[in-house]
Image: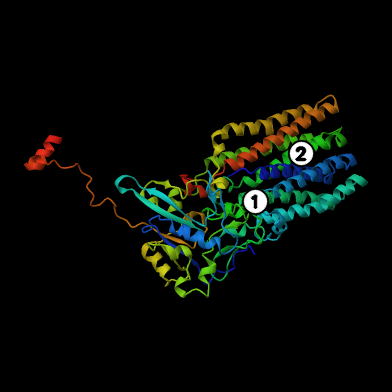
C-alpha cells in the first residue's frame, strides 16, 4: 500500500495528541497528579494543537476537501465516519476540561472522564479503519487496533513527561514511570503484530483470484495496459519490502530503546532542565520511530488486488 | 446511505464472463470507456495521454494470464470490472454515503456529488474494481451502464451494458442472476460458473465461466520430424543432401 505522507503524519501526530490527552485526563481523574494550570496549558494545549494539526493534515488525503463535512454522516457502518464523529465530539469535553484546568486549577471528573474516553475511542476507530479491511491481510488482524492504541498511549506518555512533568511531579515522576511502562508494552504488541503478519498464510492466490488454479501455475502474461495506473500506484506499492527488516530495527531503536533509556536517565537527572532536555530528545526519537513504523505499516501491506498485477499470493 | 440493503434485492443484475471465448481484443474496454466517459457522472480522465507515462481511469480492463505450462498451458484473457458483490465492503466503509447498493437490482454505484475522494472504498475492494479519477477526484466504477440498461429511448435489444453489446465473441453476458431461469443463470449452471476469490466472502454477483477442458495441443505434431530418405525418390535424395 502507498504510504501517503498525509496519513502517516495524521496518525502519528493525532495519535500522540490523543495519547497525551488521555494520559493527562486519566491521571488527573485518578488523582495521581494535581491540575496545575501551567501543566494544563502546556500539556492540554499541545495535545489539542497536535490533534488539530493531524486532523487538518488528514484532509490533505481527500481529493474533494470541500465535501469533508459529509464524512461524519455514515457512523452506522463506516469506521472512517465514526473516527470523524469521535474526533469532533472529543473536542467538546477536552476544550472545557482545558478551560477549567488552566483558568481555575481544577478538573471536573465528568469532563476528564469524557475526554479520556473520547481520545481512546477516536484512536480505536483509526485502528479499526485498517483492521476491518479483508483485502489487506497484514492489516486485517487482531493486533492492528491494539498497536494504534498502545503507540498512542506510549507517545502520549513521553509527551506528558516532557510537557506536564516538570510542573506537577517533583516528588513522584508519574509520567516518566508511565512512559517507561507503556513504551515496551506498545512495541511488544507491535513486534507480535509483525511476527503474526509474517507468519500468516496468504488469504488468496493468483489461482483463486483468476479461478485458473486447476490448469496449473498461473502467471500474469499481459498486463492490461503498458504503464501504471491508480490501482498500481495506490495499492501495488512494493519499494520498501527490500529494507523492511532494517527499517523495523530502526523503528525499534528510535521508537523504544533510545527514548526508554533517555527517560530512565531523566528520572535520576540532577537538574530538572537536564531532565527536560533528555525527555525532549526521547519525545523526538519516539515520534520518529512511530513515523517509521507507520511508513512500514503501509509499505509492507499487500493488497489482494495486486494478484491481478502479477503477485502470486497476498 | 452506506448500509447495505436489509434484504437481498429481488433482482441481481450482473455479468457472466466466458474465459473460454474471450480473445482479449479489448473492444469491451474501449466501448466501456467511450460510453461511460460521456454518461453517468464525471468523464473518465486520461492523463498524459501522449506523454511518457500515460494513465487514465478505466472501469473495465482485460488482463492476460498464462495458466499451466508446456503442452497443457494456455493463454487466458481475463476481463475484470466491478463484480457488484452482495457483501460489498466498498459500500459500508464509505464515510459520506456516496457509495451505495441499489435495493432493487443490487447494482453498486457512487453518487459522485457526495464523494470526497478518500479512496477507502478502493482499499476495501479485493478485486481492484474502483479507480479514483485523476481529474475529477471522485471514485469511478462500473455502473453496469445504468444509463443504458434502463434507457427508455433505446430499442429493447440495446438495453444492455456497452461491453456486452460490443463483444465480438459473445464472451460477456448480462442478466438477472437472482432468476434461476435467466440466460445467465443457466449459463452459470451449465458451465460451472465460479466466483473470484470466494474465500474472502464478498459474494460477487458477476460470475466467470472457466475455459473448457481439453488440451489445446491435441492434433499438433510434437514428435521429431520424420526421416524422408528411406522413401527414396527426389525428396529422399534432397533429405540426404541436406542432412
Q: Disc 2 and disc 1: Cα gap in Å?
A: 22 Å
Residue under pointer 2: A157
Taking B95 as reference, is B211 left or right?
left
Please state which of residues A272 and B123 is positioned toward the viewer in this rendering: B123
Chain ID of residue with mark 2: A
| Horizontal and vertical percent position of residue A121 | 72, 51
Q: Position of residue B22 (x, y in %)?
A: 39, 58
Residue underneath mark 1: A128
- The N terminus of chain B: image quadrant: bottom right
Closest to the observer, A268 or B1: B1
Residue B175: image x %, image y %? Answer: 46, 69
Q: Is residue A187 visible?
A: no
- The quadrant in which residue A33 appears is top right
Within 10 Å of disc 2 (Cα), the crowding (few <14, some 14-19, many 20+) is many
In the rendered image, which quarter contains the C terminus of chain B?
top left
Both marks 2 and 1 on one chain:
yes
| Residue at the (40%, 56%) spot, across then down | B25
Number of numbered discs overlaid on the protein picture: 2
Query: Quick check: A172 left or right of A296?
Result: right
- Check disc 1 and report its element: helix, strand or loop: helix
Amino acid at each position: 500500500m502507498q504510504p501517503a505522507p498525509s496519513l502517516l503524519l495524521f496518525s502519528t501526530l493525532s495519535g500522540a495528541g490523543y495519547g497525551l490527552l488521555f494520559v493527562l485526563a486519566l491521571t488527573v481523574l485518578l488523582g495521581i497528579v494535581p491540575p496545575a494550570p501551567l501543566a494544563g496549558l502546556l500539556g492540554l494545549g499541545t495535545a489539542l494543537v497536535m490533534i488539530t494539526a493531524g486532523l487538518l493534515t488528514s484532509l490533505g488525503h481527500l481529493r474533494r476537501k470541500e465535501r469533508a463535512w459529509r464524512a461524519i454522516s455514515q457512523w452506522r457502518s463506516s469506521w472512517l465516519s465514526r473516527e470523524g464523529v469521535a474526533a469532533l465530539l472529543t473536542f467538546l469535553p477536552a476544550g472545557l476540561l482545558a478551560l477549567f484546568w488552566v483558568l481555575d486549577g481544577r478538573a471536573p471528573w465528568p469532563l476528564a472522564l469524557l475526554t479520556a474516553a473520547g481520545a481512546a475511542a477516536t484512536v480505536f476507530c483509526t485502528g479499526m479503519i485498517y483492521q476491518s479491511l479483508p483485502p489487506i491481510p497484514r492489516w486485517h488482524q487482531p493486533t492492528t487496533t491494539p498497536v494504534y492504541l498502545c503507540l498512542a498511549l506510549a507517545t502520549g506518555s513521553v509527551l506528558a513527561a516532557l510537557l506536564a512533568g516538570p510542573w506537577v511531579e517533583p516528588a513522584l515522576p508519574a509520567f516518566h514511570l508511565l512512559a517507561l511502562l507503556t513504551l515496551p508494552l506498545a512495541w511488544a504488541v507491535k513486534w507480535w503484530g509483525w511476527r503474526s503478519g509474517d507468519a500468516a498464510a496468504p488469504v488468496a492466490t493468483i489461482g483463486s483470484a483468476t479461478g485458473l488454479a486447476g490448469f496449473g501455475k498461473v502467471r500474469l502474461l499481459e498486463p492490461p495496459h503498458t504503464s501504471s495506473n491508480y490501482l498500481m500506484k495506490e495499492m501495488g506499492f512494493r519499494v520498501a519490502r527490500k529494507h523492511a527488516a532494517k527499517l523495523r530495527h530502526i523503528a525499534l531503536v528510535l521508537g523504544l530503546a533510545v527514548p526508554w533509556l533517555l527517560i530512565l536517565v531523566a528520572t535520576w537527572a540532577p537538574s530538572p532542565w537536564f531532565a527536560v532536555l533528555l525527555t525532549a530528545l526521547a519525545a523526538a526519537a519516539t515520534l520518529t520511530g512511530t513515523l517509521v513504523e507507520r511508513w512500514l505499516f503501509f509499505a509492507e501491506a499487500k493488497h489482494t488486488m495486486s494478484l491481478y498485477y502479477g503477485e502470486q499470493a497476498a | 446511505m452506506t448500509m447495505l440493503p436489509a434484504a437481498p434485492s429481488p433482482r441481481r443484475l450482473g455479468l457472466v464472463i466466458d474465459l473460454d471465448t474471450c480473445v482479449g481484443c479489448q473492444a469491451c474496454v474501449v466501448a466501456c470507456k467511450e460510453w461511460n466517459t460521456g454518461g453517468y457522472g464525471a468523464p473518465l480522465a486520461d492523463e498524459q495521454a501522449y506523454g511518457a507515462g500515460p494513465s487514465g481511469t478505466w472501469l473495465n480492463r482485460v488482463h492476460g494470464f498464462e495458466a499451466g505450462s508446456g503442452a497443457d498451458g494456455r493463454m487466458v484473457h481475463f476481463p475484470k470490472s466491478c463484480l457488484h458483490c452482495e457483501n460489498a465492503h466498498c459500500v459500508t466503509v464509505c464515510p459520506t454515503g456516496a457509495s451505495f447498493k441499489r435495493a432493487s437490482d443490487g447494482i453498486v454505484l457512487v453518487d459522485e456529488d457526495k464523494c470526497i475522494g478518500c479512496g477507502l472504498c478502493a482499499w476495501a475492494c479485493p478485486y481492484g474494481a474502483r479507480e479514483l479519477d485523476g481529474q475529477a477526484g471522485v471514485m469511478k466504477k462500473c455502473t453496469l451502464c445504468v444509463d443504458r440498461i434502463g434507457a427508455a429511448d433505446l430499442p429493447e435489444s440495446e438495453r444492455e451494458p456497452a461491453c456486452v453489446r460490443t463483444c465480438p465473441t459473445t464472451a460477456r453476458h448480462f442478466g438477472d442472476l437472482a432468476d434461476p431461469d435467466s440466460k445467465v443463470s443457466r449459463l452459470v449452471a451449465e458451465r460451472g460458473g465460479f466466483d473470484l476469490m470466494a474465500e474472502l466472502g464478498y459474494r460477487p454477483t458477476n460470475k466467470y465461466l472457466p475455459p473448457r477442458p481439453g488440451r489445446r495441443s491435441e492434433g499438433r505434431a510434437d514428435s521429431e520430424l520424420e526421416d524422408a530418405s528411406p522413401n527414396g525418390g527426389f525428396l529422399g535424395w534432397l533429405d540426404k543432401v541436406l542432412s
